[in-house]
Image (tube, grey):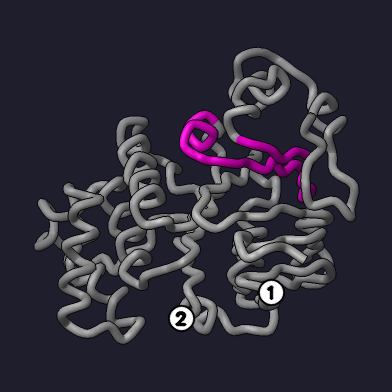
Amino acid sequence: MPGNDVILVVDNVHATYNHAITALHGVSFELRRGEILALLGANGAGKSTTLKAVSNLLPAERGQTNSGTIRYEGADVSRRKPGDLVRAGLVQVLEGRHCFKSLTVEENLISGGIGRSGRRAEINQDLQRIYDFFPRLAEKRRTLSGLTSGGEQQMTAIGRALMSRPCLLVLDEPSMGLAPLVVQDIFLALKKLNRETGLSILVAEQNSAVALKYADHATVLENGVSVLSGPAAELRQREDVRAFYLGQQASPLLSLLTFMPSPNNSEGAMK
């Protein structure tokens, strides 16, 4: 059994859509409390499906977990409704910068506090905290979200999730479609949040370079299977990872598959 320092355990998870299309067939990893774990892989590797399974959102898209277990704070997430998981501190920011575009930035943020039935004083305190981490949102607080930039919309979506006071923040492709400097600002803010508040973060990313720079650990997915896990700093130095995922030179996938964990081993075969 994992110790108290482990907040999330994904153990050999298999998942399908419409009971026919296989999306995951052996995903395993652990996220320790107070750490950032990056879930890496190309488009279609199974990252988004894994995150939706973690938040028990697959049934809303005709998906299902067929085998394996996912435990948040020791409890099976499949037995809890997504709303109950949010109230328990597991909050996901979906891919696509979802905001209420007809509301101002601040109204979007406040909606996150209302969702957890926060009191006015608590909401005001949390708003200031969000503005401290994302100063650009303070500048745009009275602007309709639909009129803000893509980066500001992503910050708004993350800020609204933070207003729910999560213990585990789950992010799906936060860098997608954003300029490199904006991506850096977002990840710097996430790292600052992690360091100053102890927030645990699970982030799925195609941008492996930035994810490995700011994460503590990483797990690589390929075709719905976790093929490699280890400390982010070590993975950054590995030639096979640098070649295949950071694009520094051509490299076959087989070099990664050599390190595929067994179905009963949630850890990769890092040496």
Residue nearest the observer in this picture, 61 or 139:
139
Residue 210 counted in the magenta span: yes
Residue 219 x/y as whole percent = 67, 43
**Residue type at numbered disc 1:** Arg
Q: What label sits on residue 212 in the rendered view?
A: none
> What is the magenta range?
209-231
Q: Amino acid at mark 2?
A: Arg
Picture coordinates of residue 137 (x, y %)?
Answer: 18, 54
**How far apart are labels 2 and 1 at the CA level?**
24 Å
Element type at mark 2: helix
Label 2: few (<14), some or many (≥20) within 10 Å?
Answer: some
- Helix, strand or loop status at disc 1: loop
Q: Residues within 10 Å of mark 1 (few under 14, many from 20)?
A: few
Residue at 79 percent of width and 48 percent of height: 225
Which residue is pictured at 70% across the width and 46% down the height?
Answer: 45
In this view, 11 is above or below 56? above
One can see residue 22 in this view: yes
Residue 8 in the magenta stretch? The answer is no
Residue located beneath label 2 in the image: 87
Q: Which of marks 1 and 2 precedes in the sequence?
A: 1
Q: Nearer the viewer, residue 119 or 63?
A: 119
Q: Split into 4 quadrants, where in the image is the N terminus? A: bottom right
122 shown above or below 35: below
Q: Which residue is mark 1?
A: 62
Mark 2 in CB contact with mark 1 (< 8 angstroms) = no
Front position in the image: 1 or 186: 1
* Residue 61 at least partly seen: no
Tell me where residue 96 appears, x and y as whole percent: 43, 55
